[in-house]
Image (cartoon, grey):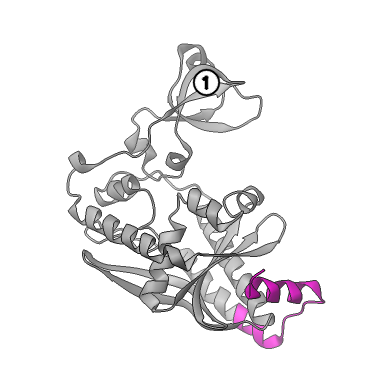
Amino acid sequence: MNNLQSKIDVYLSGNPTLSREIIFQASQMFNEKLTRFNHVRISDKKSLPSLSQIGKPMCQLQAAKLGWKQEAKPNHFKIMMTYGDMTEVVAVSILLAAGIKITDLNKKVKLPTKSGDLYGELDLVIEMEDKTVWDIKSASSYSYDSRFASYQELKRHDDFGYCCQLFGYAKAEGVKVGGWIILNKGTGEMKVIEADPDDEAYFLEQIENKALQISKTESKEQFQRLYDDAPETYYKKITGNRKLQRPCTFCDYKFDCWKGLKYVENPVSKAKRFDYYTKMSPKYEAVVS
């Protein structure tokens, strides 16, 4: 078990309390973060992606660069983002109360590449034996146990580009890579996932290659979709319907990418859930129409 996880566990296993100083600091942090609720993001199609975006699938980055129409955000989007900010405040408070030295919080950084500068804002730098960059993530119970089960699982299912983001922050700040501090939104559990510093060269190369390709993307003809749709099966039988693969479901440009895409209640499953369909057989088309 790493030292950071050990310190957190020792603090939480006793009778954890927060000092007045930490409570005041947390209130100041949340006050600053709550002002972001009013922030309106303006996209600059001429600029390179931010460090929080550069690790996403290339087709998403190209769609953004080309100015494709984004899917409308749900009404609860800003509340969801604010919840994430609040989680960060709670995590930082616990780290401080556990005696962990934080040298930087929400620091803006710049990573030079051959194609231009990438900008971002790291969550925190922790100093133990060395200074290391860490990112705080809130997760559902399912994601906590699957995507964030381990570093290897995170690398394998990194549709959001968390690895490039973290290694980019570390390089930009000139310190070592740390990892991720994950809070389970459902249970309140908290765990630490350490990144493998030996992966630095690989992810920095990914950043360079993506920045170069995006800088050269000027027309729709250069767009390359990375994922095909997939046949739907039910009890191992093909239904005749086709659905988006998981990475595409998170993309803001999926409706512009897949013309005729439908987000409807799954007509096959007994569970009440909605899926993204690129094609539906006539049998089920009539059901959802």
Q: Which residue position holds label 1?
A: 288
Q: Nearer the viewer, residue 178 or 63?
A: 178
Given the current orientation, which residue lies at the most extreme bottom position? 21
The overriding secondary structure of the stretch rendered in magenta is: helix
The type of residue carrying mark 1 is Val
Given the current orientation, which residue lies at the most extreme top position? 283
Q: Residue 105: percent from the left, percent from the top?
A: 50, 78
Residue sitting at 38 percent across and 37 percent down? 227
Given the current orientation, which residue lies at the most extreme right position? 15
Residue sitting at 20 percent across and 41 percent down? 220
Query: Residue 251, located in which quarter of the rendered image?
Result: top left
Q: Which residues are magenta?
A: 1-26
182 horizontally vs 60: left or right: right
Query: Residue 256, located in which quarter of the rendered image?
Result: top left
Q: Nearer the viewer, residue 118 or 149?
A: 149
How many residues crowd around disc 1 within 10 Å: few (fewer than 14), some, or many (20 or more)?
few
Q: Quadrant of the N terminus?
A: bottom right
Residue sitting at 26 percent across and 48 percent down? 67
Is residue 69 found inside the magenta-colored segment of the image? no
Q: How many marks?
A: 1
Residue sitting at 17 percent across and 44 percent down? 219
Above-or-below relation of 73 to 51:
above
Is residue 7 found inside the magenta-colored segment of the image? yes
Given the current orientation, which residue lies at the most extreme front position? 198
Q: Residue 36: percent from the left, percent from the top?
A: 47, 68
Q: Residue 82: percent from the left, percent from the top?
A: 55, 62
136 horizontally vs 57: left or right: right
Element on which disc 1 rests: helix
Above-or-below relation of 104 to 138:
below
